[in-house]
Image (spheres, helix red, strand yellow):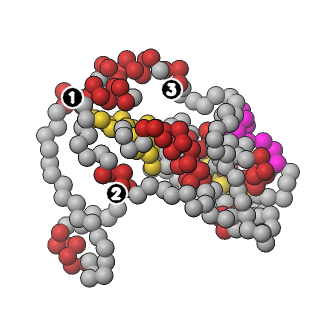
């Protein structure tokens, strides 16, 4: 999001443009209330620590209501692209990440004709997450029509709330299984061989829609009452701390 002063906004905006004007107001920060996690929340975290692991288990996730299926256009052919050239550092990172995925049971060797190349997009913290370039596959995939929520609609529901908790799911996409008839289409090629995902990888065109549908199904009774969900971002909101503990 690009931020401008009011003068810049008036200068740059055109009559036909649609824009949003936000006014920021400085508020006093109560350090005593925000410096640490409230005791009641700590007690909740301790009570439910068994469902808050630091890492994924060494097994596939359970079958849920939604599995991710890749439906291609009728005239489609298997997509195949040669591996990209990678630097020695990228190769070392790829090998390490593949060993992790294999140990967790999230990928397996593939012998079918699909195959996408691997690339890396450095993060600000210096890490190199492995990404699969599914652009060719996405181009011939029939797009889901499942609605992704509007941000402004979600913000409307937060009016009056004063206490918030954000849930950060542990590798959320990897907690959704691939449909059996689509596993082979997730194949990616490396100098160490071809592999395919048993869980939903990042980069597939309909992955956000599948994840949103699953989150909406799981949290349906709470949606817009005390929870809003935007794909893998889950926010719990309440009017006060007592109510918030109940919502959590």
Q: CA distance from mark 3 to mark 1?
A: 25 Å
**Looking at the image, is mark 1 or mark 2 earlier in the sequence?**
1
List the residue tagged with mark 2.
152
Report which quarter residue 16 is drawn in.
bottom left
Few, some or many residues within 10 Å of mark 2 (<14, 14–19, 20+): few
**Looking at the image, is mark 2 or mark 3 earlier in the sequence?**
3
List the residue tagged with mark 1.
33
- Residue at image point 19% right, 27% down: 32
Q: Is residue 24 magenta?
A: no
Name the mark on residue 121: none
Q: Quadrant of the C terminus?
A: top left
- Residue at image point 36% right, 55% down: 153
Which sits in the foreground, 46 or 4?
46
- Residue at image point 23% right, 65% down: 21
Q: CA distance from mark 2 to mark 3?
A: 30 Å
Magenta stretch, residue numbers: 98-110
**SS at mark 2 in the image:** helix
């Amino acid at each position: 999001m690009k931020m401008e002063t009011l003068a810049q906004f008036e200068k740059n905006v055109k009559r036909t443009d649609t824009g949003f004007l936000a006014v920021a107001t400085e508020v006093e920060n109560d350090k005593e209330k925000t410096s640490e996690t409230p005791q009641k929340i700590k007690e909740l975290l301790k009570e439910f620590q068994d469902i808050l692991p630091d890492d994924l288990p060494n097994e596939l996730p359970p079958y849920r209501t939604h599995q991710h299926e890749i439906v291609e256009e009728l005239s489609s052919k298997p997509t195949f692209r040669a591996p990209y050239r990678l630097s020695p550092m990228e190769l070392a990172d790829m090998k390490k990440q593949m060993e992790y995925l294999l140990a967790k049971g999230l990928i397996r060797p593939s012998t079918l004709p699909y195959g996408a190349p691997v690339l890396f997009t450095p993060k600000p913290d210096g890490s190199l997450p492995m990404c699969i370039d599914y652009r060719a596959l996405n181009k011939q995939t029939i797009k889901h029509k499942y609605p992704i929520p509007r941000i402004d609609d979600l913000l409307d529901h937060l009016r009056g709330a004063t206490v918030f908790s954000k849930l950060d799911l542990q590798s959320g996409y990897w907690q959704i299984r691939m449909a059996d008839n689509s596993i082979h289409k997730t194949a990616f090629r490396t100098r160490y061989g071809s592999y395919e995902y048993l869980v939903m990888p990042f980069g597939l065109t309909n992955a956000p829609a599948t994840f949103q549908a699953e989150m909406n199904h799981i949290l349906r009774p709470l949606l817009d009452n005390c929870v809003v969900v935007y794909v893998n971002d889950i926010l719990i909101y309440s009017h006060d701390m007592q109510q918030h503990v109940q919502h959590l």
